[in-house]
Amino acid sequence: MTQPYVGRFAPSPTGPLHFGSLIAAVASYLEARTARGRWLLRIEDVDRPRAVAGAEDAILRTLDRFGFEWDGPVLRQSERDDVYEAALDALRRDGWVFDCACTRREIADSSLGRDGAPRYPGTCRTGLPAGRAARTVRLRTEPGQVLCFDDQVLGRLCEDVWREVGDFVLKRADGLFAYQLAVVVDDAASGVTDVVRGADLVDSTCRQLWLQRCLGLPEPRYAHLPVGTNREGAKLSKQTWAPALDDEQPGPALHAALDLLGQSPPAAMAGWPTTGIWAWAMAHWRLSEVPRLRSLVVPGTFCEAEV
Ligand code: GLU
């Protein structure tokens, strides 16, 4: 018997939902529902300083107005420090993590990995330099371990995490747990079988696979969707002034999201009530139609707030 499908949507409450996040919400929802699976909602507020007051409420309200129905209670990362600490303890017991004294500036001169970030040169792997205090906790990576996964949209992807990234941070200098640890621990704790999210996170996936191995956790399937960008190629975000979705007008945004996801929705859909839109979408959804691209330009109205 195959395992029942569990999917999730995991927005960060750094602002209201915009069209870029809607793409991930729509695709993860339709994948879960057409597989008769569960669809969980997780608020990724592990990075407390980036969380914006009121953003979580706004996100939940928008999802509700857009007709999304999530299963079970909403999980909040800010309430799960003890779970992340327990995972870190387990890794420490097994010798997978080490304390690191390096500052960002000390690592800045190191060679750059594929994502443009400096690769950790291994300074504290064998112990803290004399007189230096621990700032972060890092996970050991191993030379010669090329990790691969079969992305359901992008195809087979591989990375030598040791060569491209090096030992990476699980607990930050400000005492907060890193996204990589939280996401892996949470997906496993919730029994997530399928991760459907934006391709801006595809370069994190092999780090997450490595962490799953070190923690002895199962590996979910992955599907990375094209990330919505403006005409200049910048990812839609608060920084690029992506406007909040209009709670009063779900139709045009859902139509545009399905269109961008390659589903060829009828033009008239923009004027339909959400029940009709979801009925059409459930009947027609095909992950195989999603463009095999890491990014796609989004229609102007969803890109830039009017000034
Ligand atoms: N919280 C991340 C975001 O809002 C998503 C993380 C994930 O899906 O793994 O971009």
Image (tube, helix red, strand yellow):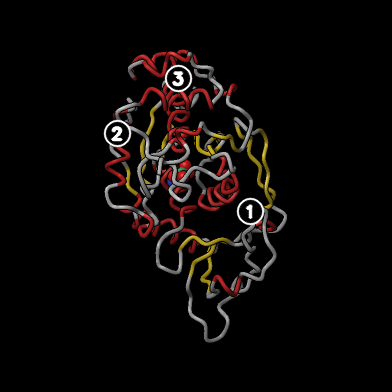
Per the model, the C-alpha gap separating discs 2 and 3 is 18 Å
Determine the secondary structure under disc 2. loop
Q: Residue at x 54, y 38 (%)?
A: 227
Name the residue carrying label 1: 115
Q: Quadrant of the C terminus?
A: top left
The circle on residue 89 is none
Type of residue at label 3?
Answer: Thr
Image position, residue 119 (x, y; %): 64, 63
Left or right? Give the position of 38 relative to 291. left
Mark 3: few/some/many CA within 10 Å (<14, 14-19, 20+): some
Q: Residue at x 69, y 49 (%)?
A: 146
Q: Give the vertical position of 105 relative to 280 (above or below).
A: below
**Which of the two residues, 192 or 24, is positioned nearer the viewer here?**
24
Number of dots carrying numbers:
3
Q: Residue at x 54, y 39 (%)?
A: 229
Q: Which residue occupies the extreme bottom position in the image?
A: 131
2 and 1 marks in contact (CB < 8 Å):
no
Per the model, the C-alpha gap separating discs 1 and 3 is 34 Å
Marks 1, 3: nearer the viewer:
1
Determine the secondary structure under disc 3. helix
Q: Which residue occupies the extreme front position in the image?
A: 307
Q: Residue at x 52, y 39 (%)?
A: 198
The circle on residue 72 is 2
Q: Give the vertical position of 138 relative to 126 (above or below).
A: above
Is label 2 within 8 A of ligand 1 (CB to nearest ligand atom)? Answer: no
Name the residue carrying label 3: 34
Image position, residue 238 (x, y; %): 43, 48
Type of residue at label 2?
Answer: Gly
Is label 1 within 8 A of ligand 1 (CB to nearest ligand atom)? Answer: no
Marks 2, 1: nearer the viewer:
1
First in residue order: circle 2 vs circle 1: 2
